[in-house]
Amino acid sequence: MANAVILGAGRLGKGFLGETLANAPRWHTTFLDKDAGVIRKLKETGSYHVQVYRKECIEEHEVSGYEAYETLLEPQDCHAIVYADLLFLSIYPQDFPEAIAYVKEIFKMRAKTNPNQKLSMLCLTNKNGMIPMIQDAFVKDMNEELLSWFMHQVVIRDTIIRRSTDADDHRSLNIRSTAVLSLLIQPPLTIDIADIEWLELCDDIAMLKDIKVFLVNGPHAASAYLGWYRGYTIINELLEDEDGAAFIQEVTKEIRAGILQQYSISEEQLDKLSVFPKAKGDMPDTVYRVGKDPLRKLSYDDRLCGSARMCKAHHLPYEYIVQAIAYGLLYDEKTDEAAMQMQILIQEKGIIEAVHQICGFSYQDDLLKEICSWYVRLKNK
């Protein structure tokens, strides 16, 4: 028996990782989460349901046999990490500092009670370039003995998520998930994962992750923000709209042209990374899930602004990307805390200062001026 711990029992943690591991008989799974409501529901029911959209069929899978603990309150969560072979960090970028501090304390116990077992930590986030920061945060202030153990026994690896997973909220026990492409994982690991479906080792993760975030997540975010602007709640509805689908195709075309100029990758390799095979049926994907946290998704290096900068640097068109950014700045979802922060900033400081702060462009940058121009045009439409 091998042990996997999933830190972050939200949609992705349960709907992808938990469901995938449940299909691998060698693995025992433990969920950890700081949200007491998430853990309470997992414990009370002892199972949850995942509707899996595969290429050939839609599967109904009842996941059970796991353990679940609330972090910092239940001592068994420490035990789970002390004896884990795989530790998945399925959390948002802003939650990593707190998670690292938590895991780091448990490592002190692991180094003493289980020093010879190796551990692979897999970070599941769409934000690139985080692994050096995560590594530095772990080793900071470690004494010489603990540092030596950590460097010899623990590896931290990045991943590329190529799976949509959704539910009514992060506590829900009824989850929808596509299963058409694997999670790409930076090698090497300290344990064989060949028996776990949808996990695949892949080189050049840093480059491929940039490309994936631009070419897959960029148009996806554009779909959410345009969808919200047009009054849709499900992205599928926008893509069935002829004008909406055409707009997203143009965003994709611009980003793809930029990538082929920026990176050493062939069109065939690009398709293999980013073209998702069609699943059986259409999994409903909500505007809220995809649009969530526009402050991060509209930032300088992220999916849309990073793509616009790339196209501009190569003297390529980026008009549709700029429009998508403007739609994002109009995103006024009352239940999204980051969206509300963004709207307050725009109201108090004006759109020019907001674009400067959110998107990171200088006041002299043509991109800032074009985004602001489109924002005003769309707002007054």
Image (cartoon, rainbow, N blue to C red):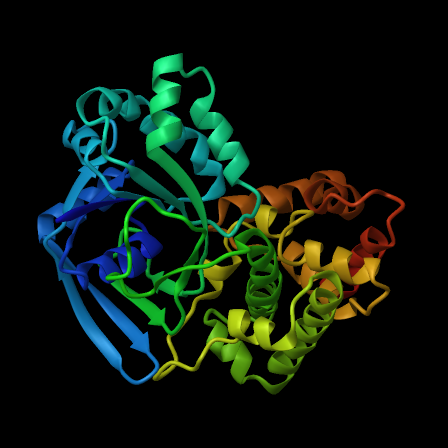
Outermost residue on the top side: it is: 143
x, y percent for residue 244: 61, 79
- How many numbered marks have been drawn onto this rendered protein structure? 0
The foreground one among 191 and 23 is 191
82 lies above or below 47: above
Q: As drawn, is 78 to the left or to the right of 335?
A: left
Residue under the point 59% across and 77% down: 268
The foreground one among 256 and 264 is 264
Q: As drawn, is 313 to the left or to the right of 276?
A: right
Can residue 380 be seen in this snapshot? no
Q: As drawn, is 198 to the left or to the right of 371?
A: left
310 lies above or below 361: below
Quadrant of the frame with the C terminus: bottom right
The foreground one among 332 and 169 is 169
Outermost residue on the right side: it is: 364
Can residue 22 be seen in this snapshot? yes
Write down the quadrant of residue 102 in the picture: top left
Write down the quadrant of residue 230 in the picture: bottom right
Residue under the point 28% across and 53% down: 192
x, y percent for residue 160: 47, 57
x, y percent for residue 25: 13, 60
x, y percent for residue 100: 39, 30
Residue under the point 60% across and 81% down: 245
The foreground one among 217 and 83 is 83
Residue under the point 23% across and 26% down: 115
356 lies above or below 65: above
